[in-house]
Amino acid sequence: MIKSKKMAGRAILMAGPPGTGKTAIALAMSHELGNKVPFCPMVGSEVFSSEIKKTEVLMENFRRAIGLRIKESKEVYEGEVTELTPVETENPMGGYGKTVSHVIIGLKTAKGTKQLKLDPTIYESLQKEKVEVGDVIYIEANSGAVKRQGRSDTFAAEFDLEAEEYVPLPKGDVHKKKEVIQDVTLHDLDMANAKPQGGQDILSMVGQLIKSKKTEITDKLRKEINKVVNKYIDQGIAELVPGVLFIDEVHMLDLETFTYLHRALESAIAPIVIFATNRGRCLVRGTDDIISPHGIPLDLLDRLLIIRTTPYNQKDMEAIIKLRANTEGHVLDDEALVTLSEIGTRSTLRYVVQLLTPAALTAKTNGRTAISKQDILEVSTLFLDAKSSARILTENKDKFMR
């Protein structure tokens, strides 16, 4: 639904007990969507700050989760560098040093070659990009910006273990029109257009020096940027890419932020919002007596698609533990795997995953490379999971201080 752009401005709630994979699903989604779709994760408690307003934090993250893909057609010179010669002249200021008056660069494509005489500022850009003969580059005709794309693949047979990226020789003419695609988020545009605040008096000058460049992004500025963005979209220059805003522990938000979320979801430019919570019926923060499912007001709950996550069964746990052991480089025998999954069904998956490292150390101390059932049983007597701990506290409540 997200990939087909049918989800913008909608919200999903993942609700389930702790350790049932809510955050894991969100992470998997971000990987699946790729780096072109913005994914902004945050925790409910992040909105409470003594420096920034709660709604400001939410809005900033909303804007981080909305991407803009800008397509520009640029005139470029592209090709493999065949010649790179800086031409020096006497320093006009006098003295012994010489200055670069211009640079002669030869570019070759599959169709032909061209020699260019360029400004000395472009020579500096070429040096910054570490361009050498044999590299494939493009130079923007208007701005003079230089981009090194990689080394020409005709040199690919030099060494086997090179960290170099090889690119094919460009097709077409050296001088051509090229479509350049830029991906930015709306928050990037806000930051680029915000003006640093502060007057001319000494105190505010010092304040500007001490403080990091945290600038005020006003609602007015955002509306202006939205107008420009909408104009670009209408002209076909830009395309809106609604990303994902993932808010974990959503029950930590209060009534004020829930009301703001309601408004933000209804705005024309909005991302897909995914909430996650492990609470059942609980008090809505910011109120005295309103008890609601998941601690979310009913009017907002009404807008959400709710996905229920359930605890894993023994077979699922076996598969997850096996994957985790492989990732951490532990070797488990079959009996140990079954024992761990049995302990997991009694306690939680998180607990048994944490047992892996101590069990591996126990096995190593006993001179074995693989973790056996005996190691698991030994380690499980040393540590307590939350349920066992609660049971012991209940049984021995007289022995503990109140």
Image (cartoon, helix red, strand yellow):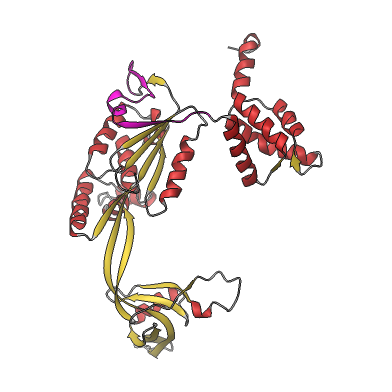
Q: Is residue 247 visible?
A: yes
Furthest-right residue in this view: 367
Q: Residue at x 54, y 77 (%)?
A: 156
* Quadrant in which the C terminus is drawn: top right
Q: Is residue 347 visible?
A: no
Asked if residue 285 is positioned above or below residue 106 in the image, the reply reads: above
Q: Residue at x 67, y 37 (%)?
A: 356
Residue numbers of the magenta segment: 286-311
Asked if residue 18 is positioned above or below residue 37 in the image, the reply reads: above
Furthest-bottom residue in this view: 90
* Quadrant in which the N terminus is drawn: top left
The part of the image, by quadrant, that contains residue 107 is bottom left
Q: Where's residue 175, x and y in %?
A: 31, 81
Q: Where's residue 183, x and y in %?
A: 33, 58
Which of 40 and 3 lies nearest the eye of the viewer? 3
Asked if residue 241 is positioned above or below residue 313 in the image, the reply reads: below
Furthest-front residue in this view: 315
The part of the image, by quadrant, that contains residue 127 is bottom left
Q: Where's residue 212, x and y in %?
A: 38, 50
Which of 296 and 223 lies nearest the eye of the viewer? 296
Q: Residue at x 43, y 47 (%)?
A: 30
Which of 52 and 264 lies nearest the eye of the viewer? 264
